[in-house]
């Protein structure tokens, strides 16, 4: 939750009303972009503005791991939940399934949820430069293009994002601040140096510092800390020459060298951490004579580039510039094996406290391949399926083949990660390498599970080639809608069902691919251990869909039953709903309308608030089943025109008025009346209306809608 904590302005901070007013005036636009190099006070400015802007706000502190689209969207939704509890819960459930729907569908559902927030609000994406992902950039652009009017997006970044800023400017949808805007003016420099930092510099000294730093806030801050240390402004100020980062290195060295040895060691060794808390730092330092909690509080009191991340002062981070220099100095002063040991300790703490992705990240940096491999497996749910695909792929790609051969599980993970990241052409090579590495191994439970995972990955690959997406609900929905629009009332029900349900393969190559999915999915289920529920569920789902497409309904039912059972055990409503929908489609295809209706009703009940296209199809399925039952109770079903005429009769319109409204001749209207009465087996208008209400062809005025 520290990622969603809005930093609080520091006491005695320099108030920058000239900038906060510009931010407030630009709120009618879609995006505020604050783009400048490190050390220009971007985050501090936004946190100051949010305290007085009069709008509710959500915050995301972004980092490299958020380049994963699933993780980015999860962060986005979680931040919104700080404004409205339970918002996006259905979407989060969808994102956490083995086969999420198309990105555009997820984003559309997310925008729909955002529209439910009635009051104007702000969402801040802090440090967007850390996210380097075309998929995230594309998702952000889609969200911006369709952003509800009550939402304003703020982005702080060291470099411009890869979205069409020029187009946003032309449309007056972009408010932006740059480095030139963020620099301290002379008066702000004086306020900061003499009031906030407690110095007593002359106006000439302040002007000299301001000129030498060009208003660069980090430089002024470092200079102030140096002057506080020895009060020698005359010596410090002339050192400001050359580029900022040379000044930065020099001043941080001065500041570090003046700290007690214990503090220097603490700063350097804990610089490996993205976030800091007392117990984590204690485990990394492994020095009982040092209280990390007290050290962090003292660093904050000294204003030594430590940023609190929650109200309780439990979690902190170093200022990014400060952290960069600390890490550089750590590399220069500590042996590589000792740095690896620091990462190993951090990994152990993160694992013990349930932060498995962070544990994996530090295991990788510690060069502990066995530990990283174990963490990557994720105890049944691999980390790359939980938002760590990019870092997993980078690590696996860096390993020599000998290390992978020694650990066949890594070949399997490699193929699975490539599949998840869309690099399909390389998947089979990794799976084949895994099989070679496993050749001759005793088929114990672990080896059998790996064989099952290889088969499940191949089934998914075949499924992707077959459908273009592991989850093709939107495509099936479009086929259903087209079928319903183009089907006449007297067409055979079988033809409609055939189009709405997942279609049977028409071509030979598609048949072969479906058969390949079935073969590999069955193999996966025969090898996977019973408690490996995530992978078993994915394999059973693919087996059910492929069997349904091939018309092997008994196998599809069995597979869907396992999906439902496993999904309920894991708490994944989405997969259960989709499997129940599949069962309903099978019952419908075999003309058991009553049972099909029961399945569709169960899907709707279980789906609840999940934003699923399948739930819309479940409603349509129920309507089809009900209409089928109504039709069986009529001598002949009413045509669409007859239903229109019946509705106008119920509104009390005369035959003449009905003709005028529908542009029909009076005799034509009378002919419609006659056929309606015959089909409903009545003689009068009032009887026709009553009979239509009984058959639910018209709404009952006595029942609430």
Image (spheres, rainbow, N blue to C red):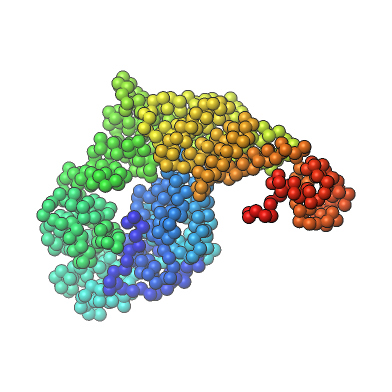
Q: Quadrant of residue 377 in the image?
A: top left
Nearer to us in this view, 7 or 314: 314
Is 196 on the left or on the right of 566, as rendered? Answer: left
Residue sitting farthest toward the bottom: 203
Instruction: Determine whether 515 is above or below 70 in the image.
Output: above
In the picture, which quadrant includes the N terminus?
bottom left
Residue 207, visible in the rendered structure = no
The residue depicted at 48 percent of the width and 32 percent of the height is 561
The residue depicted at 23 percent of the width and 66 percent of the height is 303
Is 287 on the left or on the right of 535, as rendered? Answer: left
Residue 44, visible in the rendered structure = yes
In the picture, which quadrant includes the C terminus?
bottom right
Q: Quadrant of residue 295 in the image?
A: bottom left
Is 232 on the left or on the right of 242, as rendered? Answer: left
Residue 156 position within the rendered picture, expressed as x and y whole percent measured from the top left? 39, 61
Is 254 on the left or on the right of 652, as rendered? Answer: left
Residue 572 position within the rendered picture, expressed as x and y whole percent measured from the top left? 44, 41
Instruction: Determine whether 305 is above or below 513 in the image.
Output: below
The residue depicted at 80 percent of the width and 42 percent of the height is 681
Instruction: Determine whether 168 is above or below 192 in the image.
Output: above
Residue sitting farthest toward the right: 667
Number of residue marks:
0
Nearer to us in this view, 431 or 658: 658
Residue 158 position within the rendered picture, expressed as x and y whole percent measured from the top left? 36, 59
Residue 481 position within the rendered picture, expressed as x and y whole percent measured from the top left? 64, 42
Nearer to us in this view, 171 or 247: 171
């Amino acid at each position: 939750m520290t990622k969603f904590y809005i930093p609080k302005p520091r006491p005695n901070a320099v108030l920058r009303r000239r900038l906060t007013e510009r931010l407030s005036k630009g709120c009618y636009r879609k995006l505020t972009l604050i783009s400048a190099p490190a050390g220009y006070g971007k985050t501090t400015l936004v946190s100051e503005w949010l305290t007085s802007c009069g709008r509710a706000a959500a915050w995301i502190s972004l980092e490299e791991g958020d380049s994963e689209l699933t993780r980015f969207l999860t962060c986005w939704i979680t931040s919104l939940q700080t404004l409205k509890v339970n918002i996006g819960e259905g979407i989060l459930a969808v994102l956490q399934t083995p086969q999420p729907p198309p990105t555009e569908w997820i984003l559309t559902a997310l925008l729909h949820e955002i529209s439910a927030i009635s009051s104007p609000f702000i969402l801040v994406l802090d440090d967007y430069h850390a996210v380097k992902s075309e998929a995230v950039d594309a998702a952000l652009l889609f969200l911006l293009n369709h952003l509800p009017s009550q939402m304003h997006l703020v982005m702080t970044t060291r470099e411009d994002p890869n979205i069409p800023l020029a187009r946003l400017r032309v449309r007056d949808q972009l408010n932006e601040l740059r480095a030139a805007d963020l620099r301290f003016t002379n008066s702000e420099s004086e306020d900061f140096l003499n009031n906030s930092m407690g110095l007593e510099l002359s106006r000439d000294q302040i002007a000299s510092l301001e000129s030498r730093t060009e208003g660069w806030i980090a430089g002024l801050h470092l200079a102030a800390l140096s002057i506080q240390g020895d009060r020698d402004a005359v010596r410090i100020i002339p050192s400001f020459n050359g580029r900022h980062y040379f000044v930065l290195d020099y001043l941080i060295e001065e500041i570090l060298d003046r700290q007690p040895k214990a503090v220097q060691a603490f700063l350097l060794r804990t610089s490996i951490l993205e976030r800091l808390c007392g117990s984590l730092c204690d485990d990394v330092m492994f020095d009982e004579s040092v209280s990390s909690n007290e050290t962090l509080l003292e660093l904050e009191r000294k204003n030594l580039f430590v940023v609190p991340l929650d109200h309780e002062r439990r979690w902190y981070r170093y200022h990014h510039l400060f952290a960069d220099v600390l890490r550089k100095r750590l590399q220069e002063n500590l042996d590589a094996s000792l740095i690896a040991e620091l990462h190993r300790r951090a990994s152990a703490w993160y694992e013990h406290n349930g932060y498995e992705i962070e544990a994996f990240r530090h295991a990788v940096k510690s060069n502990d391949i066995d530990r990283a491999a174990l963490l990557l497996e994720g105890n049944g749910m691999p980390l790359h399926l939980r938002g760590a695909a990019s870092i997993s792929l980078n690590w696996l790609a860096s390993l020599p083949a000998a290390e992978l051969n020694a650990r066949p599980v890594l070949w399997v993970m490699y193929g699975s990660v490539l599949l998840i990241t869309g690099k399909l052409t390389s998947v089979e090579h990794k799976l084949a390498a895994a099989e070679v590495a496993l050749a001759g191994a005793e088929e114990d439970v672990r080896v059998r599970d790996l064989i099952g995972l290889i088969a499940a990955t191949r089934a998914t690959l075949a499924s992707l080639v077959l459908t273009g997406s592991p989850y093709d609900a939107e495509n099936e929905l479009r086929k259903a809608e087209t079928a319903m629009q183009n089907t006449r009332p007297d067409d055979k029900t079988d033809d409609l069902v055939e189009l709405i349900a997942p279609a049977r393969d028409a071509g030979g190559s598609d048949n072969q691919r479906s058969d390949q999915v079935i073969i590999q999915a069955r193999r996966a289920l025969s090898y996977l251990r019973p408690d490996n529920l995530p992978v078993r569920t994915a394999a059973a789902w693919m087996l059910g869909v492929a069997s349904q497409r091939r018309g092997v309904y008994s196998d599809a039912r069995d597979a869907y039953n396992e999906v439902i059972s496993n999904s309920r055990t894991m708490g994944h409503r989405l997969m259960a709903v989709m499997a129940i929908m599949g069962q309903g489609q099978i019952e419908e295809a075999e003309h058991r309308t009553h049972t099909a209706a029961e399945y569709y009703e169960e899907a709707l009940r279980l789906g609840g608030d999940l934003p699923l296209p399948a739930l819309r199809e479940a409603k349509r399925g129920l309507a089809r089943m009900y209409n089928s039952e109504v039709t069986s109770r009529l001598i002949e079903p009413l045509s669409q025109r007859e239903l229109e005429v019946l509705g106008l009769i119920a509104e009390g319109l005369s035959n003449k008025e009905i003709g005028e409204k529908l542009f029909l001749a009076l005799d034509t209207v009378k002919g419609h009346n006659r056929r309606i009465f015959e089909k409903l087996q009545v003689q009068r208008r009032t009887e026709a209306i009553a009979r239509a209400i009984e058959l639910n062809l018209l709404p009952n005025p006595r029942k609430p809608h």
